[in-house]
Image: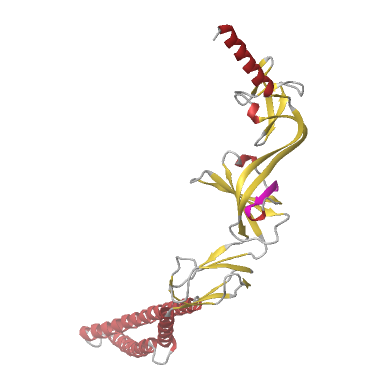
Amino acid sequence: MNRSIIVIMILLINGCSKNGEKIKPQLKNLTESVYSSVTIQPDSLYQGYAIVSGILDKNLVEEGDEVNVNDPLLQIVNNTPLLNSENAKLSLELAQENYKGSAAILSGIKEEIEAAQLKFKNDSINFLRQKNLWNQNIGSKAEYDAKKLNYELSKNNLGLLQNKYNQTKNQLNTSLKQASNNYQAAIINTKDFTVKSKINGKVYALFKEPGEIVNSMEPLASIGSSNVFVVEMLVDEVDIVKLQKNQDVLITLDAYNGELFHAKVSKIFPKKDERNQTFKVEALFINAPKVLYPGLSGEANIIISQKENVLVIPKSYLIDTNKVKTQNGLVTIQIGLENMELVEVISGITEDTYIFKPE
């Protein structure tokens, strides 16, 4: 093929391509938003646990039932706490008898103290009498020493018995208090056989069937609000700094065929999920769908900012994030607001400038 013909064909192709892909910037209203996936959950959703282990006797509610605070949800069977309660009661009664009863340990010590007081009194009289005689040079030194020794032994014995009484009384009083505390704790454990609702709401799930073993580590039920639902969103760490409370959220749910719902950001969780590098954000509906279920999914756009009548171009026409191709070559532009498709042009070109889509 002739070289001149090849050159002409290339020029024609480039010219057609260039002319076919050139556009002018347009004036439009532009909204910048942060995209997120959406999961719907009831407000105040929590999982109910048993405090004691045992066997599930019966579920007292069904999934979908509405409940009030302190309504019983499940009944657990376990005889061990009942037996512990009986043993604790017996220990308490024994401690009370030892401390207050007529046959108490303290009564025996008290009798010993009374006998020791009588002996001390007698030995004291004998010692003083012998001491007076000794001062008058009457009697022997051996008799004086014997009476003095008996007096001192009686005095020491009385002191020991009194200390023993006080110590025993304190020990019995402590044992009585411990037995009382153990009995109260045992009674509380017997009351934990029934799992009750902590909120006014709805039972969304029951995880165990009657006859199954339950423990304090596994959830038994899931309960949450029956009429207030939370929009849960996972936002990339790159975008989280753009968000704040009360920003508008536009939501579409898979179950409602693209119908648009409005919400507002209600809470931004400060801790990042290291597994997927996202932050959890919650929003509350302004116009909620009539029927919602936990786990419904969809998409959301959190509105960051909005501008009216700004100069925009498609993002696909950008080169190196801030340049466009014009009839005069590459031109650097200053960009502002942007969304998934469009970007605002602040300076560098006008609405009369033709720009070309990069190949």
On-image quarter of the N terminus? top right
Give the percent coordinates (x, y) of residue 165.
38, 82
Check the image and name the residue furthest to the right. Answer: 309
Give the percent coordinates (x, y) of residue 171.
39, 78
Quadrant hosting residue 310: top right
Magenta segment includes 87: no
Please tell me which residue is depicted at 63% across the width and 43% down the height of the picture.
Answer: 35
- Residue 248 seen in the figure: yes
Quadrant hosting residue 159: bottom left
Please tell me which residue is depicted at 70% across the width and 51% down the height of the picture.
Answer: 259
Give the percent coordinates (x, y) of residue 172.
40, 81
Tell which of 72 and 256 is nearer to you: 256
Tell which of 238 and 344 is nearer to you: 344
Part of the protein shown in magenta: 246-254
On-image quarter of the C terminus? top right
Check the image and name the residue furthest to the front. Answer: 1
Relative height, residue 288 to residue 334 (above, below)? below
- Display colour scheme: secondary structure
